[in-house]
Structures are given as structure tokens and as C-alpha cells.
Amino acid sequence: RCSVDRFARRYARARQIDVRTAVLGARPAVHTWAKAVSGLGFKVPVWAPREPGPFDELLERYGEFRRRWRGVMESSLRAECAAITRFLKWMRRRRLPLTSVTATQIDRFVLELSSRLAAKTIAGICSALRSFLRFLHATGVMPLDMAAAVLMPRVRRGARPPAVRPWREICRILRGIDRRTALGKRDYAALLMMAAYGMGAGEALSLQMDDIDWRGGSLWVRRPKTGVDVVLPLIGPVGLAIASYLQHGRPQAAATRAVFVRARAPHPRFAVRELGKRLLAHALSVGISGPPLGTHMLRRCHATR
């Protein structure tokens, strides 16, 4: 990794381009290439992990606390840590000690967020911040429990109902996917499954090979937030779409047991963000644009229908 960064900086200076852009472009490119070369049997240096950040140790202890004593799932914990990192960086820029956080400082932080974020997003950040402040007090880092000082905006349940698209538009998007290509087979199978069952993207993309009972005609799906397993009947069109992708679209060199994988080596599990981009591209190709066009939109449309 250090060698790649040195090369990227030298390349950026020679080409007179932005150094950060060059580094962020070189890292995934060379890392993917190294994985492919290693898969062919050649020895390559171990890709060293990133250098530890200033908050890594504290967030690791917080994560262990939340897993052990609160049973928080990893997906929720990642979102919490991202929100807490915002606050830690805000404190660090102002050179404020974490051991003596005041209500005034918390209010300033929340007010700055309110100038550029939606109320629902701010409420989520405040909820994570409350949990973090309780953790600091419980572990003796802070003498006072400042969780009650975090005042979050009220988000009324019925204030803004979730926006949905007409079901006919969902059908247009699915019909517009070119299933003659490997990418088209993958996208169609994943999006059809989400639309047919009302799955979230995390549920669909976490599907493993062993979760499909072809003879029994069922799917085992795990809820990402709760870890609860749900058994669903394998609907005919969904089963055909998945089978077509597995037989004629999924890379044979993929080492993971996940059903949906990236087309580019080393073929890891397909990511939620990437599926969202693919959904937007398919929608635009059939003339459908405008919000909302995220993956969760399929879940809402299924529920509305």
C-alpha cells in the first residue's frame, strides 16, 4: 500500500493532477490487480491495512460494548460509528477535550448539522451520540452522563409519508434490463427478487448459495438488523432469473458463496451502493428519472402494491 501511494504521488506530480484523486484511483486498481495475480498462483506482497486513525481504538471499544451489552448488529453499528466520527472530528478541529463535553458544545454541533442535513438524518446522528455519551460515562471517561443534553429534532411518523413510484414504472424498469449480458442477468435477478418479496438490498445481496432450496422451493433470508432468519417460497420467475444468472452470468472464478457478485476480479459480494447505481442507470435507460430511485424504493412500492 505504501508503495502504491508513493507511485500515485509521483504520477500526480508528473501529470500535474490532483494528488488525492491519483491516490484514491491507484489503491483499488492495484489492489484488485494484486488479488488477480495472487489468484493465478504468483506471490505478491501482503497488502498492508490502512494506518490506524485517531479514533479507531475508542470506536473499537465502543463497538465491542454495543455488541456485547446491547446486541447491536454490525450494519447498525457502522452507521452509529460514522455518526460518532462526525462529532469526534468536530471536537478535534476545535481542540476541545472529550472528557469535558458541555451541553453548549453539543448544541453547537447539532445546530451546524441542521444547516445542511434533514431532520430525520440529524435525529439518527443524535441518537448515536446519546449512546456514545452513555458509553463514555459508563466506562469512566466522562464524570457526567451527558446523554440527556443531546436534544434532537422531532420527526413525526406521519409528517412525510415515504414516496413511492407507480408499480407500472417498476415493471418498465425490469423489462428494460438487457438480460443478454451477464450484468443484465445479475441486475435483473437481484432487482426482481427485491420487487417481488419487498426485500431490502442488504437482504437480497446477503443471499448465499446454500440459502436456496431448489428442490423444496424455498429461500432462507436473514434480516440484517435483527439477524432473524425468514423462510420464503421460491417464486417461479425469481427462481428462473437466479438460475439463469448462476448458469450463464455469474463468474466461475468467484470464491465467495454469495449469489450476487461483482463482475470484476476478484469477484467479491455485490455492494448495496453499486446496486443502487445500477438501478438508477436502468431507470434512466427507459426514461424514468427523479426521486426516489434508490433500492429501498422497491421495498416501499411492494408494500404499497
Image: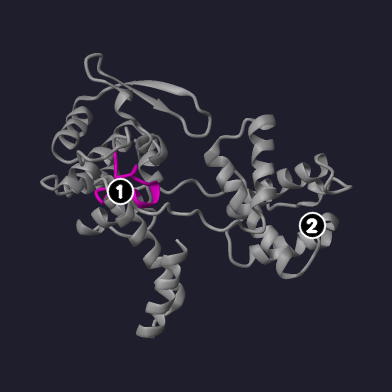
The residue carrying pointer 1 sits among few (fewer than 14), some (14 to 19) or many (20 or more) residues within 10 Å by Cα, namely some
Question: Most prominent secondary structure in the magenta stretch?
Answer: loop
Dot in front, 2 or 1: 1
Q: Quadrant of residue 69?
A: top right
Q: CA distance from mark 2 to mark 1?
A: 44 Å
| 302 up-or-down from 145: above or below | above
What span is in magenta? 260-275
Residue 195: image x %, image y %?
31, 37
Q: Residue furthest front?
A: 43
Q: Of the residues shown, which amino acid type is indicated by label 1?
A: Ser
Q: Quadrant of residue 255?
A: top left
Which residue is pictured at 28% across the width and 49% down the height?
42
- In this rendered view, identify the residue nearer to me: 188 or 157: 188
Residue 85, numbered label: none
Q: Secondary structure at mark 2?
A: helix
Question: Dot 2 corresponds to which residue?
Answer: 98
Quadrant for the C terminus in the image = top left
Residue 182: image x %, image y %?
16, 46
| 22 up-or-down from 60: above or below | below
Residue 210: image x %, image y %?
31, 23
Q: Earlier in the sequence, mark 2 or mark 1?
A: 1
Question: Dot 1 corresponds to which residue?
Answer: 38
Whether residue 261 appears in magenta in the rendering, the answer is yes
The residue carrying pointer 2 sits among few (fewer than 14), some (14 to 19) or many (20 or more) residues within 10 Å by Cα, namely some
Residue 166: image x %, image y %?
30, 46
